Amino acid sequence: MRGSSHLAIGLITGVAVAGLVPHVPFSVAGIALAGFSSLAPDLDHPNSRLSKRLGFVQQYVRWAFVLAGAALAVYTHFLLPLGPDRRMGFTAALAFGLIGAAMQGNSVRRLALLFTGLCTIVAGFYTEFLWLSMLGAFVSVAPFTSHRSWTHTLWAAGLWTYIGHLANYTLGWHGVAWFAGAGYLSHLVADSLTKAGVKWLMPLTDACFKIPLIRTGSASGNALEVAICLGYAALVLSLVLGNMSF
């Protein structure tokens, strides 16, 4: 399913949580969190919306390697004496330059997300927010997994919900776990409507759970995604309005 459809379903799910779950206050931030969470499973996909947004340093990674190689070459030339260290310095400088020049889209994306995740981990340690470090670890690891593998499992949804629970406890923002977990699960349910399906219980079983209604990327599939989003929105709206009338 397309990222725009996942985002729409996630936001609608956030409205459902805000309007239907007892003792969870209506929150625009919570609905936005559900939308964000609905995109999180696709951090394993090179063209996902969230990968592109979180990998904000992506365009600079290649140049960073090239510049690091150039800086190391200058350092080696002027400061290291003739001998093994000098040869090693120039070899390392050449390696950095070649790696930077050879990098293509997916490898750059992975390194950018790794850097983003590591910075988030450090920020979590600095602020003593465990949930922030766990979020950074998720962002760091997810891009190095194959698409629809471990990020598309019930265990990953549980981990994401637990991160929300810790944030709820630390920040005192009631309902974070609900918005985060529901948004994440909405992605898995939506992908279960595609022909590829989802391996919810991997690695316990490789069984693929699916109701093969949607062929992602096709004209009919895109139209069906829009219809599902509209129908889901109408259902949630009617339930929320009905709940408010009591």
Image (cartoon, rainbow, N blue to C red):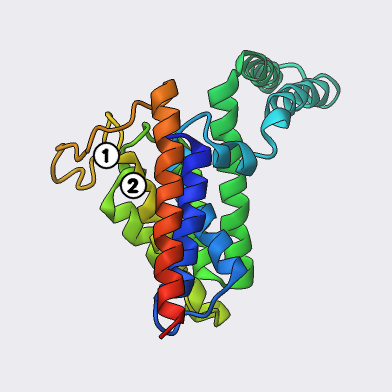
- Residue 128 on image: x %, y %: 57, 73
Callout 2 secondary element: helix
Q: Quadrant of the N terminus?
A: top left
Give the Cα distance between marks 1 and 2. Answer: 7 Å
Q: Position of residue 53 (x, y in %)?
A: 63, 41
Which of disc 2 and disc 1 is earlier in sequence? 2
| Residue 95 visible at all | yes
Q: Secondary structure at mark 1?
A: loop
| Label 1 with label 2: CB-CB less than 8 Å | yes
Decide: is 184 above or below 179. above
Q: Which mark is residue 188?
A: 2
Question: What residue appears at the point 42 percent right and 37 percent down from the top-left corner?
Answer: 225
Q: Is residue 231 above or below residue 161?
A: above
Q: Residues within 10 Å of mark 1 (few under 14, many from 20)?
A: many
Quarter occupied by residue 220:
top left
The image quarter in which residue 142 lies = top left
Viewer-nearest residue: 202 or 240: 240
The residue labelled by disc 1 is 198
Q: Amino acid at mark 1?
A: Val
